[in-house]
Amino acid sequence: MPFKLSIYPWVHCCRCNDNQWKGEFIEHEHCSPEEEARLGAEDDLLTRRNHIPGVPMVNFTSQYGLGCFEGLKAYPQKDGTLKLFRPERNCARMAVSMRGLRMPPIPEDLLLETIFEIVRRNKVLGFAPEYDAAWEKDIWQNAATVYVRPFAISEPGIGVNLSVTPWVITICTTVSAYFRLGENNAVVSKRIRATPGGTGWIKTAANYVTSTLAKAEALDEGYMEAIFLDCTTGKNIEEGSSCNFFAVLKDGTVVTPELHDTILPGITRDSVMVLARDMGMKTQERDLSLEEVFDDASECFVTGTAAGVTPLSSITREGKTKRFASLEADSVSNRFLKQLKGIQFGALSDKHGWMRDV
């Protein structure tokens, strides 16, 4: 399981009233990290921790999906410290998402400070994985990290309406590999993830219903990932189930779909484009048809906070399968994987200043 519902003891609860944000850190009941590791997912202690007093069950988020969230990671380092990867970008995107839902946005500096402090407080209690040299054997693909999840949830409400006094709650837990190691075969979904003029560019909870269904259908059919096409032409690739899509063409050009309002602006996506240019590769952000990928792509991979850089072995549509060289040891996909993970876990130079000390 990549995610485990074992929320760390310290959480942060912040609420907006009259456009003023006020929050507090809450230390929940806990045992030692070693004792908690032996608890089952339904243990009363962990269940109690998954509740915030005063947050309503019936609200515009639970009833209509009017909520948004972020996800970022703190990476264990060999010296025993933790480093966050580009956290300011997540804070900026959270504000954009909240504005997109016509919520008052949490100030970026307040959220950034909260993220650093909540990771620090939980680490003091021992709730953070320690660096393990064994992770290096598979390019840190099975490494454990601290996952930080800030999410917006609305005030009480049962009629369809906007949120004007939302909460932003920030929690941490431990995560590992999102995809299984080995072949990652994808299938083109018949579903549509987002429509022009909709909310595809917002990291809103509502977007993930279709993604979840498409991913489940892909797994039922024996695939690891679902790929979405655009709803206008039905020809162009947009995203994976919860990640951005890349193709490496036969001439070495690295292509990712242009950021229309149907595509989430991924932070890992942006980072890979920077790394590609650092490596002297030609990059393009443009419409990318499935036909072009089948005819001219030598490799494909997906990116995201959870996915990292995940090479795809193949893509199937309506019984037709195209296989890629993405998993070969010297592939471009693996070069990006090694470069990004190396920076995140401190093995390679961080010349862009992406990693922030906790």
Image (cartoon, rainbow, N blue to C red):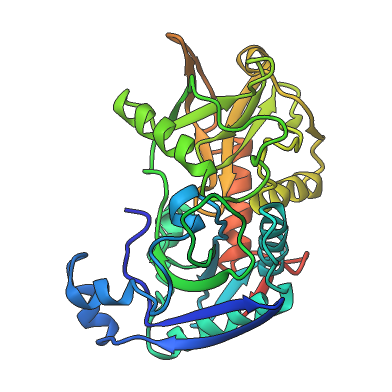
Q: Is residue 79 visible?
A: no
Which residue is drawn at the image coordinates 48% and 23% (left, top)? 189
Which of 291 and 107 lies nearest the eye of the viewer? 107
Which residue occupies the extreme front position in the image? Answer: 159
Query: Which residue reaches farthest top?
Result: 319
- How many numbered marks are there? 0
Q: Going by the image, does 167 lie left or right of 258?
A: left
> Vertical placement of 214 versus 358: above or below?
above
Please determine whether, in this image, residue 44 is positioned above or below residue 233.
below
Q: Is residue 6 above or below residue 27?
A: above
Residue 12 on image: x %, y %: 50, 80
Task: Give the image location of residue 300, x and y in percent.
Answer: 59, 30
The C terminus, quarter of image: bottom right
Residue drawn at x 58%, y 44% is 303
Visible residue check, residue 89: yes
Question: Residue 58 appears in which quarter of the rendering?
Answer: bottom left
* Residue at the image point whose x is 40% and y is 33% from the top: 213
On the picture, is 175 further left or further right than 295?
left
- Nearer-the-camera pick, 64 or 319: 64
Whole-percent x, y for residue 338 in the image? 58, 51
Q: Identify the image quadrant of residue 326.
A: top right
Q: Is residue 51 left or right of residue 289?
A: left
Quarter of image, res 355: bottom right
In front of the other: 331 or 117 = 117
Residue 14 placement (x, y as % from top left): 56, 79
